[in-house]
Amino acid sequence: MTGGIDDLINYRISRAFETIKEAESMIENEFWNASINRIYYACFYAVSGLLLKSDIDTSTHKGIRQMFGLHYVKTGLVSKEFAKFFSDLYDRRQTSDYDDFVEYDRETSERLLSLSKDFVTEIDKLIKEK
């Protein structure tokens, strides 16, 4: 891999951890739906970095989820539970951003934040192992 790709991978995982902090701030300020958005994007940035580490480039959210499933979940490198979590987060982010009269709450936001920290940490470990 070239230095440029490595820099991009490092940027994306760094962005994932930074976005977790953004989600924490949203929760502290009781912006539940915004926290769901940031939680999803933290995981999205991590997965996109992981895929780049494997020379897999995708341009859509759907493509990222599909390639993640194909190359990491089906091969057993990532648990099915993490894959389901990532897909669920995508759906929740869509709902929180685009649907009317949808309100998440502290309990849901905090639970998803906790899971996202585990998810991003696991993805970071995979990136470092490759």
Image (tube, rainbow, N blue to C red):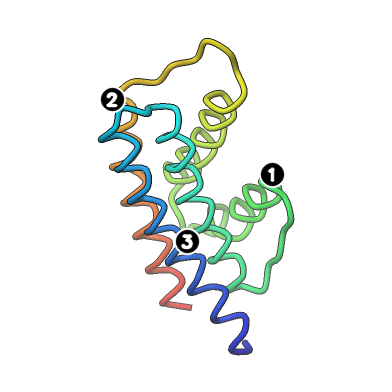
In three-dimensional space, the C-alpha distance between marks 3 and 2, rounded to whole angstroms, equals: 31 Å
- Residue 44 vs residue 32: left or right? right
11 and 65: which one is in front? Answer: 11
Residue behind mark 3: 77
Which element type, helix, strand or loop, lies under badge 3?
loop
Could you tell me which residue is drawn at 61 percent across and 70 percent down?
52
List the single residue furthest toward the top: 101
Residue behind mark 2: 106
- Residue type at mark 2 is Arg
- Residue type at mark 3 is Leu
Could you tell me which residue is drawn at 50 percent across and 47 percent down?
41
> Mark 2 or mark 3, which is nearer the start of the sequence?
3
Q: Is the N terminus in the top left, top right, bottom left or bottom right quadrant?
A: bottom right
- Residue 74 vs residue 67: left or right? left
Query: Where 37 sits versus 32, above or below?
Result: below
Residue behind mark 1: 62
Do labels 2 and 1 touch, CB within 8 Å? no
Could you tell me which residue is drawn at 42 percent across and 42 percent down?
39
Which element type, helix, strand or loop, lies under badge 1?
helix
Give x and y (percent) for residue 128.
41, 76
Do labels 3 and 1 touch, CB within 8 Å? no
> Mark 1 or mark 2, which is nearer the start of the sequence?
1
